[in-house]
Amino acid sequence: MHASPMGISVKMCGMPSFRDPMQPLLDAIATLTLPVDAQRIFHGRGGLYPGCEHWTLDAFPPVFVLTSYLPTTEDTEQELSTIGAALAARLQQLAPDEALNWVFQCRSAALRQQGKSETRLMAGSMPEPHTVTEQGALFRVQVMKGQNHGLFLDMAAGRRWVREHTAAHRDDRFGFKVLNLFAYTCAFSVVALQAGAKHVVNVDMGQGAMATGQYNHQRNDLTNGASFLVHDIFSTWGKINRGGPYNLVIVDPPSYQKGSFVATKDYARLVRRLPELLAPGGHALLCLNSPELGMAFLQDQVKALVPELEFVERVVNPPAFADVSPDRALKVLVYRVPE
């Protein structure tokens, strides 16, 4: 067999079979439904599709974002042409009156080490402002700027858990209070307030991210109930403690950010603080997105430093983020302090 331009296998007499390594990505495009919410379409990074480990495809409606984690080569332009044709063909089937908007971003290891990426608008245009939805919430994204687009799609199940947990406790006697550490653009805060939280304290040292977080609250008509502290968490414990105790503490740090947070040495500093931050019966949502650090890394720290916390569950990641190894994938663990 040999591969056609679209990666379809064609039988050739007397020749060995051959499958285009891009075929799983092309298959995902050929079978996608028209996205409404922001979501991942294809997750090569999970290791389930040999030859496609460097590709991801996301939908930030009305824009598709294709990402490669390998440096561009002479073959890249042909690959992009093939993928663009597949996207155009599928969109023509699903919504023939809609224009195709798609972006390509290269995040090779060399670029990531410099905190950079290369981004190209391949077709169409970008909305401005670009707002996407998830479970009825609105979030601003910027897919042409940097590696972080404003909403981490792999955390969708974590946000769903926060929404459901908050809704189940919204009528607690003193109101439901949330501490959102490393708040980024405050998506957790938005869903908690929509679900009935009385107050959310958002803490992050990124002024631009927090400004987007405030915009997200305004966009969702959440004019009360949120505080925004643009501070280094480790030097702000006084202000953080004064807002407590909290019924839910969310810890979602970067796994490695030079000069700010390194999980292997700094996560313990956060775990030690949990008992003084949590109200009796309160919960902690501990998140870690590092392929090198497994679930045991967090569990061992909690067991050693705050053994009184009870492990409740690991939040299951969205199906689109399936991984050959659960330890490599995003870890979102729920703990509870006894009454």
Image (spheres, helix red, strand yellow):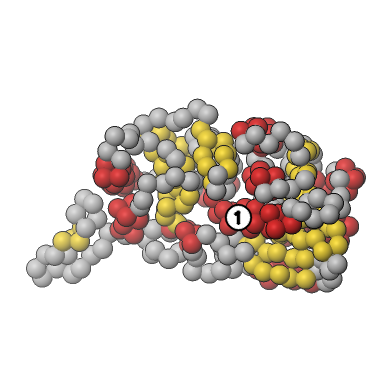
Percent across and percent down for residue 306 are 84, 67
Name the residue beneath numbered marker 1.
160
Decide which of 98, 332 is in the foreground and name it.
98
| Amino acid tagged 1 | Arg
Decide which of 76, 63 is in the foreground and name it.
63
- Judge whether residue 94 can be spotted in this image: yes
Q: Please identify the residue farthest to the left as the structure is shown.
A: 13
Q: Residue at x 67, y 69 (%)?
A: 313
User: Is residue 75 shown above or below 330?
Assistant: above
Q: Give the side of residue 5 with respect to residue 255, left or right.
A: left
- Judge whether residue 103 can be spotted in this image: no
Q: Residue at x 64, y 67 (%)?
A: 314
Q: Residue 207 lies in what quarter of the image?
A: top right
Q: Residue at x 86, y 62 (%)?
A: 280
Which image quarter holds the C terminus? bottom right
Percent across and percent down for residue 276 are 89, 57
Within 10 angstroms of label 1, few (less than 14), some, or many (20 or more) residues? some
Which image quarter holds the N terminus? bottom left
What is the tally of numbered marks visible in this picture? 1
Q: Give the side of residue 332 with respect to residue 29, left or right.
A: right
Q: Residue at x 68, y 54 (%)?
A: 167
